[in-house]
Every structure is written in C-alpha cells, then in structure tokens.
Image (cartoon, rainbow, N blue to C red):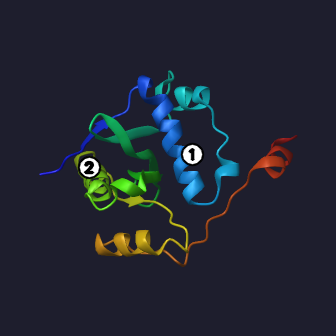
Amino acid sequence: MTDFTLREATEADLPEILRLVRDLADYEKLLHEAVGTEADFREALFGPTPRVFCTLAERQGRAIGQAIWFYNFSTFTGRPGIYLEDIYVEPANRGLGVGMAFFRHLAQRAVAENCTRMEWQVLDWNAPAIRFYDRIGSQSRDEWRVRRLSGDALRALAQD
C-alpha cells in the first residue's frame, strides 16, 4: 500500500509546480536557468491551447513530486509518443515508489493512446536515475546527440 497519490495538476497547483521545478533545477545545478514564471506555466499548462501536462504526487496533502510531459510525434511510425520533460521527487520522499508510479502512469497512458514510445533525457552524472531507468527497461540512445538552439542564436536565425 502506498501513502501517496498521483493526480493531474490544476491551476491552483501553480505555486507548487514552480517550487518543484526550482527544486529540480537546484538539484541539477541549473537553478540559474529556472526563469519560468507562474504566468508562463499558467499559459503552457492551462491556457487555451495547453502545450504541456503535469502529474503531481501528493503525500499527506502536500505535493512531493511531479512529472511534466507533452506529446511528440514519430514520422517513421506515424504515431505520437510521450516526451517526459521533467520528473522530480523530493529527496526526502524517494524510495516510496513515486518515480515508478509516475513512469507506470505515463506508460499506461501511452499504451491506451496508441503511442509508440516514451522518451526523456538524463544528465550523465545522475547515476541513481540512470540505474532506475535501466531497471525499468529503457535503452540509452547514445548514437543521437541532443542539439539546442536558443537565446541570441535562436533570435538571429529567426530574423529575415
């Protein structure tokens, strides 16, 4: 029996969502990059065209973790997938099965919606997460390199 529950986030959860995002950024030593505001998350999660989704884990009425995800698409299969942007469980609440519950929840959703895959990224130094991902059967795609265009380079490319 678990002593936590999963549920889909609501607009009232925005302060907790931001708190958990910043906790994750701090854990990943990237707090300086966590600049999203409550307004940004309100628009992305609950605006007229939601772009991302958030599942929360609660224990004793308090958010202890979250999974933020969105749909991607495989042109090779012609079907969608789920991209897990962030998963985070507070350190004090790790070991309760919350991470496994998040992955199981999203896998069930992916299967029910005829998605072909779930994908995510992990920092190369995060050995505990990598061990967990290996245990659940995920495979590393080392032949693929993540590329990012942002900031000044993004704005420069967007100019006519």
Q: Quadrant of residue 92?
A: bottom left
- Point out residue 4 in the picture as x, y percentages from the top left corner: 24, 45
As shown in the figure, which amino acid type bears the numbered disc 1?
Arg
Which residue is pictured at 39% across the width and 74% down the height? 139
Which residue is pictured at 55% across the width and 58% down the height? 27
Answer with left or right where residue 34 lies relative to residue 125.
right
**Quick one: which residue is furthest to the left in this view?**
1
Compute the Cα span from label 1 to label 2.
23 Å
Query: Could you tell me if residue 91 is visible in this image?
Result: yes
As shown in the figure, which amino acid type bears the numbered disc 2?
His
Q: Are marks 1 and 2 in contact (CB under 8 Å)?
A: no
Which residue is pictured at 68% across the width and 49% down the height? 33
Q: Above or below — where is 3 with respect to 50?
A: below
Nearest the camera: 4 or 56? 4
Answer with left or right where residue 93 lies relative to residue 46.
left
Q: Nearer the viewer, mark 1 or mark 2?
A: 1
Q: Earlier in the sequence, mark 1 or mark 2?
A: 1
Query: Could you tell me if residue 50 is visible in this image?
Result: no
Residue occupied by mark 1: 22
Q: Quadrant of residue 100?
A: bottom left
Residue occupied by mark 2: 105
